[in-house]
Image (spheres, helix red, strand yellow):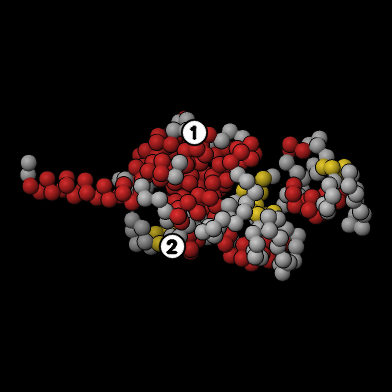
Amino acid sequence: MNRRVLVAILTVTFLTSVVHAQNYRWNASFQTYIDQYRDLAIQEMLRYNIPASITLAQGLLESGAGKSELVRKGNNHFGIKCHGWTGRTVYHDDDLTQECFRAYDNALQSFEDHSKFLVNGTRYRSLFSLKRTDYKGWARGLKAAGYATNPAYADRLISLIELYKLYEYDHAKNYDKFMAHHSAVDQPVKGRELHPIHIYNKNYYLQARQGDTFKSIADEIGISYRKLAKYNERDAKDRLVQNEVIWLKKKQKKADKAYQNRPHRVKRGESMYSIAQYYGIQLKSLYKMNRMSPDDDIHVGDLLRVR
């Protein structure tokens, strides 16, 4: 065998082993990223049929677990370039110098656009004929369709999925039942800084931890703290209570469809505001649905329409 060929083969083998060694090393920041965005990935899967494991693995790889320059500059978690994009943009050195990349207001928009990018892209159409649980087929299909130029892209996705057992999320058939089984009330966990993001009633929410403020949460999510307070119908300087729900977008006018014929029975300690927060609906809408005004009182046992 030609010596140069032998050296080339040995070099490739060595580099491949290094890549796999890096992929198979558990990383606390990667687990933190997964904890924060797993619910969002599951909901995107149930809406668009993209494996949650693939979404999470791509987010981890493309964003460096949320620490990349593209995330810092434009909340771009998936390395999606402009490709006819009419929104805000940022420039970053990639295959070429200063290439155009899509920019978002926050991570939530990035996850949503990633799903739409795959669903609407003709080059990825064949992937949707695969089973949702076929993460290996999806990983190899993304590489074959040209999502990334790195020859080891598919292997790296598969390595991440298997190391962190992300394939478990691909088996979720019903979001609410799955999360009720897998998730307890969000409590502070030693060593974890980011809040897990959940989805309900076409909105995103997280649960406040001790010491949280609208500003600290807004800085983490990447939106204005004044907007965040407004979405929750509060003053921006209000103190937050541990475990209270904080909605990340404007609340809906009605509760989820599951409550079409299911009124809410008022419990001790509840207020119209706490009930509105619980269902993710606007306070004024809750009053309107029940033909009430802010001057009206509620009592334990009262039945309230929420949809």
- Residue extending farthest to the front is 190
- Label 2 Cα crowd, 10 Å radius (few <14 / some 14-19 / many 20+): some
For residue 253, above or below residue 129: below
Category of crowding for the residue at label 1, using alpha-carbon neighbours closer than 10 angstroms: few (below 14), some (14–19), many (at least 20): many
Quarter residue 183 falls in: top right
Badge 1 vs badge 2, beta-carbon distance below 8 Å: no
Q: Which residue of the protein is positioned furthest toward the bottom in this rendering? A: 237
Q: Is residue 138 found left or right of 299 in the rendered image?
A: left
Q: Which residue is located at x 65 percent, y 52 percent?
A: 205
Q: What is the x, y in percent for residue 303? A: 87, 42
- Helix or strand or loop: what does disc 1 sit on? loop
- Identified at 36% across, 58% down, the residue is 94
Circle 2 sits on which residue?
Answer: 69
CA gap, disc 1 and disc 2: 31 Å
Quadrant showing the C terminus: top right
* Residue designated by label 1: 132
User: Three-letter amino acid code at disc 1?
Assistant: Arg
Horizontal and vertical percent position of residue 202: 67, 45
Residue nearer the viewer, 213 or 62: 213
Residue 242 vs residue 96, the one in the foreground? 242
For residue 224, above or below residue 273: below
Disc 2 element? helix
